[in-house]
Amino acid sequence: MPMLPKGLEKQLNILDFSLSSLWRRKLKNLSIMLVFALVIFLLGSFQMLTGALTNSADAVLKNTADITIQKMSAGRQEAIPLAYIEKLHSIYGIRAIIPRVWGYYFDESNLANFTIMALDSDSMPDGNKLDLTLAHGHFPKKTETDTVVIGRSVHNILGLGERRIFSLFRPDLSLKSFNMVGLFAQQTDLLTNDLIVMNLSDARDLFNIPPSMATDLCVYVANPSEIETIAKKIAGLLPDTRVLTKKQIQKTYQVVFSWRSGFASICLLTALVAFAILAWDKASGLSPEEKREIGILKILGWETGDILAIRFWESTLVSALAFIIGCTAAYFHVAFFDASLLKPVMVGWSVIHPPFKLLPSVNLADLLLIFTFSVLPYLGATVIPAWRCSTVPPDSVIR
Amino acid sequence: MRPSHLLFIFLLLLTFIDATLYLHAKRMANDLKTDQALQTIAVAGLGLTDLCIATEARYTRHPAVSDPMAPFMDHPGAIEHFPTGSFWNAPTNTETR
């Protein structure tokens, strides 16, 4: 065996001793490591999943409408009159105003909520490329009435199989039939899973909305740097509306899953409380057996520094291994198992469960945060009592 | 074999697993780029504002275009009761009315 430097050889011997000492109490140490890894796994999974969703939202929502106008009445959103478009023509810099009719359709037999979306896609940016987002079929043309494009979950929940015709209820419970002319591709599931896209006239008929009304207006601005100014002008001209800018929409997913959101707080608090109990138990003193061991080592000529080194190695091994195993398991959970433990919490009572094809977000800041909350306090909580014990005269502890 | 050697072998195994995961992440990022190109077209062409994650309540299906009061609007004194409502943070649209 090649000669190692003396200091390194000593540390290796101490490491060997620590590992043997850990192995002697394997049941206790393995269970601590398992609980520790579980807490880190939970925190890590949550952070990787929410980070991935935030990253996806950042990447894909940059092309949303520049300004969205909703009409408000008694604190609620309601249909907006198309006559409002005329009022906005006086604002210089607006490139296009596109009315949309959209809303939710609750399918009572399956308890599923679908999103119905209708607009003149030809006037939208990239409207001519929309067929690329379909697995098969085409988007309904203006002249094609009673035709729809649906998301994959809608197709599954309605149990369409090879069929193309299905019916939805109008508010007066009369049936309206639709012919499915296209199905969204799997790649757009994250956005289109629950969508039913149709013509404006069909959506008005389905929801019983008069032809002079729409759900909201999408405004496109010629110069992106003028979005805020134009939004302010719109808010001045139409005081009974809420004006949302692209920036606000993009900001939404930065806060929706932040550390302050409910579930994250619960996870964090549970982990911290569990850890506080563990640390308190450790810090409140060593067992008589451990004290005896330290006393015997001191009698055999070990220095206080060596005993501290053993304790340091022991707790470093337990906590660092738990950290690595927890984080690795969290990646597996999010990337390969669709974050199946957290998904029920994220989707609640939703009947439509979108498949999460997400790239777990692993960044240094999150890993350091989890490391600081878990590993460092554990090191402190184990080394300090060992130091307190190793400074007392050995004969008093072995007697 | 010394116990430390066993530990090094175990650490090597973990390093190997994590390196494989790193390569997996690189590959997946490339795959997702194609998906995101299509998703960007859907967003632009349909004016979409939100990700389809939870479909149970309108304020978690479309948090970007809902206001923070939406969960409590069902009737006076209404208590928010959808599970996702307690796990999703309300967007802070301070500039909206």
Image (cartoon, coloured by chain):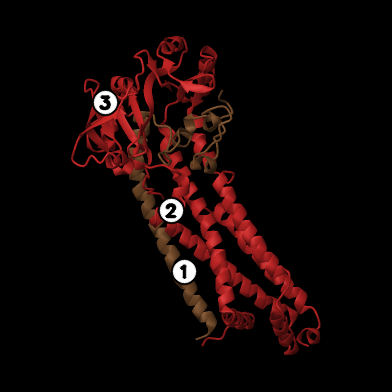
Judging from the image, what secondary structure is the residue with disc 2 in?
Answer: loop
Q: Decide: marks 1, 2 in contact (CB < 8 A)? A: no
Quadrant including the C terminus of chain A = bottom right
Instruction: Compute the Cα span from label 3 to label 2.
Output: 39 Å
- Give the amino acid at mark 1: Leu
Q: Earlier in the sequence, mark 3 or mark 2?
A: 3
Question: What residue is rendered at 43% in x and 63% in y?
Answer: B19
Please say if A387 is above or below A205.
Answer: below
Instruction: Compute the Cα span from label 3 to label 1.
Output: 59 Å
- Give the amino acid at mark 3: Leu
Chain B tint in image: brown
Instruction: Give the number of the mark in front: 1 or 2.
Output: 2
- Give the amino acid at mark 2: Ala
> Where does residue A92 sit, x and y in percent of width and height?
46, 13
Q: Which residue is mark 3?
A: A175
> Where does residue A312 sit, x and y in percent of width and height?
66, 73
The label on residue A339 is 2
Chain A tint in image: red
CA neighbours of label 3 inside 10 A, class few (<14), some (14 to 19), many (20+): few
Judging from the image, what secondary structure is the residue with disc 1 in?
Answer: helix
Q: Which residue is mark 1?
A: B14
